[in-house]
Amino acid sequence: MDFHIERAKILPKSNLWGFLEGLKGVAPLIAPVERGNKTVFSEVNDISDVTINYTRTVLPPKKFLVPYRRVRFTYSTGELSFSSNFKARDQIIFGIHSCDLHGISILDSVYLKESPDPRYLEVRKKTVLIGISCMPDDYCFCLSTGTAFPDGANWDLFLTDIGADYFVSIGSPKGDELIIELKELFRDIEREDLELYKRSTRKKKEAFRDKKLPDLERISQLIELEYESPVWDEEAKRCLSCGTCTNVCPTCFCYTSVDVPDFEGKTVKRVEFTTSCQYPYYSLVAGGHYFKPTRTARFRHRYYHKLVGYPYQIEKLGCVGCGRCSAECPAKISMVETLIKLRGADEKESGKATEQTSAGRSL
Amino acid sequence: MKKSLEKLLNKPLPVDPFKPQRAVITDVEELAPDHKKFTFAFLDESLAKVWDYIPGQFVMLTVPKAGEIPISICSSPTRKGFFELTVRKVGRKTKVLHRLKPGDVVAVRGPYGNGFPVGIMEGHNVLIIAGGLGMAPLRSLVWYILDRRSRFKEVYLLYGTRNYEFVLYKEELRRLKEREDIKCLFCLDRVETPEDREWADIEGLLTELIPQVKLEPSETYVAVCGPPVAYKFIGKELLKNGYPESQIFVSLERKMECGIGKCGHCQIGYKFACVDGPIFPLWDTKNLPEML
């Protein structure tokens, strides 16, 4: 998106806490806070808990849009009338990194493009998303997935660190309303601010220079061509099928729905909870057949869905390069490494990757 | 922000697609061991009158206290006011369903899925190939075609199952066999009893019936439903007999929780069985990994 000067403001860093306090006055505020040595998104009562310079949270902010466990309906077994006391509340999520904003845009497409889910839409309409710029660590690969900057995602305000100030981009009328509400905290943009803004973009790109990044050129085709590659087996051997990767993923949406009756059998709750394609029973059907019986099949399915499935279904890659699946994996399986290995098998590139997969299927 | 994304959020709240409608069981018929056909009518009469679907589509049926299951509709949309589901007792939820009796109330949402391309099939021959319980969704197609018979050319029904005991819709199919406007060929895996002998045209597999079909392949649409293992062999035999790949449609099932492309379980390759299927052209079975 091109920034018209009217579509952006400057927030001096000294006003940040005032800004957060102001936000909290508008609606419940959700922001990154420290828990132990990790960072999580949590509702904040005291704004001094908010951490600004964090790398990644354990769970993405999607938990405030689609809770990991939610009751869809309650019904009585007698007359079988379905009811729900669901009510979306206003909320502001502050401090979302660009990758997670893109993750939310992907969820928007999943939930709202066809057969829209009214609950998600209601929550989404009442949520204000405020992003913040960040610097990558060794797990990040958002530069490859095209999600390093908030362009093309759905958000309301985005704060870019330009030194002494934040360059605040306004992405929606909702965002503009907040600026108007708290206008005494902001100042207008000057030429130098624009220069600083451009420089910050360059700085983030440069931070990736020494990092290992996967080549995502024609990635859908690569996954399809390497569908039988031994790399899948090699990597899946280490996999514990624990489902951590999908649970921390900002774009994963699979859920299971079960009817839970109360003790008297009079009312039943229809509970939906997040599941993982890495669990064996994910594909288990009545009669005992597993459509994805092996760990390799399930392991590969995650990559296939992210890199082939999403592009077909919502015309975007299903990976935003946030690095959570690699950072949290107890078996230290890395998405980047797997993709580099696969690419090696495909293109016979020089280096270690090729040696490891020299038995790869020839095409 | 992109236009496509902006549009997504600027919509009014839709009707909850997850909310099912109540329906009463009006009839239960035992078709074969562990196979029952249930007839339902929506309690909301105005809904019952207008509720429409395409052969091959399915509904999400709430079995009270047990949960939701996806079941193909086995009645034809040309008969209004009721609908039928044939269910095999195979798991926890279907076991509870099999205990229900006429007068019991369930909840239903749908119809879901793409269904057979009946509009495109019009004006052509139709070859229907059913294996075992695959007869259920194809029964919908058979009656759809027979109720609009003049719109279609020649129609064949091939039906194979284990033995006579497991034949579904016995009386109905017997009467179909006597009709002039549909040619029925039946096979059984094992022909042992006198009833088996009386029923079966041949002892053997569906693939052996395909060469007996006297249709111009290029003018024919083929609808196949049965156990997925059979598709490979049936597909091969159909191609050998000259049926164009683009005119062969198969029905596939997967685990489903939502029916509208939200829960993710029914993915076959990059497609969702619930919204992109459950009816797929044969080409997809080659194109999508782990399809069969």
Image (cartoon, rainbow, N blue to C red):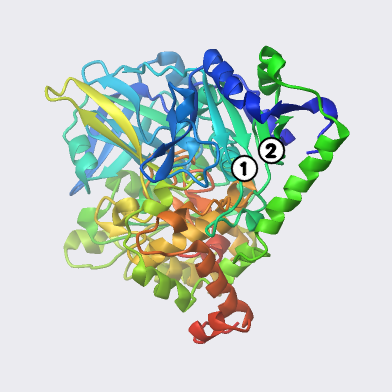
Q: Which mark is residue A205?
A: none
Amino acid type, label 1: Ser
Where A133 sits versus B106, above or below?
below
Where B276 sits versus B148, above or below?
below
- Quadrant of the rendering where the C terminus of chain A is positioned: bottom right
Whole-percent x, y for residue B35 in the image: 23, 46
Q: Residues within 10 Å of mark 1 (few under 14, many from 20)?
A: many
Within the image, what quadrant is residue B92 found in? Answer: top left
Chain that bears disc 2: A
Give a yes or no on whether discs 2 and 1 share a subunit. Answer: yes
Residue at point 64% right, 24% down? A15
Q: Which residue is mark 2?
A: A160
B205 relative to A267 in the view: left or right: right
Disc 1 secondary structure class: helix
Amino acid type, label 2: Thr
B100 relative to A224 in the view: left or right: left
Whole-percent x, y for residue A349 in the image: 63, 81
Q: Which mark is residue A98?
A: 1
Residue at point 87% right, 34% down? A191
Q: Farthest residue toward the left?
A: A264
Within the image, what quadrant is residue A106 found in? Answer: top right
> Observer-nearest residue: A303 or A239?
A239
Q: Say which of marks 2 and 1 sits in front.
A: 2
